[in-house]
Image (spheres, grey):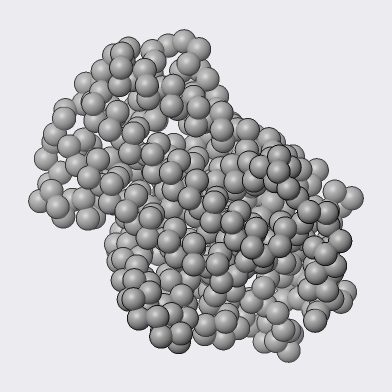
Amino acid sequence: MSLSKAAAATRTAASPAVRGPRRSVLFFAFAFAVIADPVSSVAYAIEAALRALHGDLALLLPTMSLVIGLVVIVTANYWQLVRRFPKGGGAAAAAGRAFGARWTFLPIGALVVDFVLTIGISIAAAASAVIALLPGLAPVRIPLALLLLLVVAGLTWFGHGGRLLFAVMTVAFVLISVAVLILGFASPHSSGHAAATTDPGRPAALAVVLAFPVAMALATGIEAPSTAIAQLGQLDDTHRRRFGRGTLALLLVIVGGLTLALTALAVRLHIGIPSADSTQIADIAHAAAGPGWLYDAFQLTSSLLLLAAASSSFQAGPGLLKALAGTADRPGVLPPVLGRINRHHTPYWSVVVYLAAAALIIVAATGQEQELVLFYAVAVFVSFLIGLVAMARFAHREQKTGLAWMNGLAAAAVAFTLAVNLLRGWPMLSLAATVLIAAGLYARWTRAARPAGIEDVEARAEAE
């Protein structure tokens, strides 16, 4: 048993049992904080689909229904991953054990890129939410986004506290969204002026098939419960599985429910592609509630939730680099400087790396989150694909034919989604970055004499 495993076992054995109300509070804080990323994706995924449909509202609900269907498939795979790897690890652990340690680096590379894009798109979307509320800030969109980025990065300096705060932000957004939906369906303030149907320039079925991969940015964050359960050292494997699966179920209900309800409301109120200084989700809330406290609360909670999603990646991304840098007792594959921490256990140089990368893409996208959606929906799908193929191989080895077929078909659906997005051209940059990072990490791992345990690097990053 390695030192890290022995320490984890000692900590688990020594921890008092978590029962009753304490376990409920722990689950609340864990689950709602972990799902902040996918819930926040609602703020831009529906609009991304509508733009891909060239504003055709008649096809928006079928498109988003197809998106949720694929989210269900991906979630089912991570349900299996949580069962097989209750100590965390996600797709990296599955790839390493199914195909060999060298394959671990592909999902790791995808996650590194995904964390950068999560920060960038979340900050840009938060800036858009603020501008929709305060249009006078539109001329300073990029400085506003960079300021928000610096604030979130600065708060990361003080460590990994605030999980309960993230959970509260997620709940607040969900509750305000439900209030907006009820008012919008029962007694809306106004309706938009977008046509109910337009000509998408291609047959309806083809338009939907080509548009839904763009909105698969909604699926980002689904992998989080399968890795974040490594933080639950006070629980045994059985309860980690329950927490992980419970979080996945909650994620599916909330993200699926909010997405389809907001989409249906957009169609009902004829909310089309927004103006340059607004967002579709802001226009939906304004049409439903009108100007006033509810609209203001909606914009405020959505912006805070987006900042929480960025903060979560500002913790997870540098944490992954820190784990890859290793320790004095465990050789790493990255320079030790990336593992240096302050008194709050924050790997500050790794935070700087993510800060610089996120700032670069925010400036390149001129602070517009919709410019980043396509890139966002590529990197994490590489990880999804590897995880599904690995689970299909496990099922085949164990002669679970039905499960192998299900995972294989799911992998084909994910591969199709990935291919459609890549055929749009520029998203190839996300794939190229993923492959280059994976190749670089593999080369450094080889030069370091292939230290053991690389398959568990994601679990270590969360546990530490």
Q: Is residue 156 above or below residue 452?
A: above
Q: Is residue 330 visible?
A: yes
Q: Position of residue 57 (x, y in %)?
A: 21, 35
Residue at left offset 50%, top offset 17%: 296
Q: Indicate the quadrant containing the C terminus: top left, top right, bottom left or bottom right.
A: bottom right
Residue at left offset 50%, top offset 12%: 293
Q: Is residue 154 visible?
A: no
Which residue is the extreme one toward the front? 20
Q: How many marks?
A: 0
Q: Position of residue 250 (x, y in %)?
A: 50, 46
User: Camera-side residue: 341 or 87?
Assistant: 87
Q: Position of residue 388 (x, y in %)?
A: 43, 71
User: Camera-side residue: 307 or 147?
Assistant: 307
User: Camera-side residue: 423 or 186?
Assistant: 186
Q: Is residue 220 left or right of residue 187?
A: right
Q: Is residue 68 above or below residue 404?
A: above
Q: Is residue 202 left or right of residue 419?
A: left
Residue at left offset 71%, top offset 39%: 21
Q: Position of residue 115 (x, y in %)?
A: 58, 55
Q: Is residue 296 above or below residue 196?
A: above
Q: Is residue 336 left or right of residue 202?
A: right
Corner quadrant of residue 330:
bottom right
User: Camera-side residue: 177 or 424?
Assistant: 177
Residue at left offset 60%, top offset 83%: 101
Q: Indicate the quadrant containing the N terminus: top left, top right, bottom left or bottom right.
A: bottom right
Which residue is the extreme one toward the bottom? 449
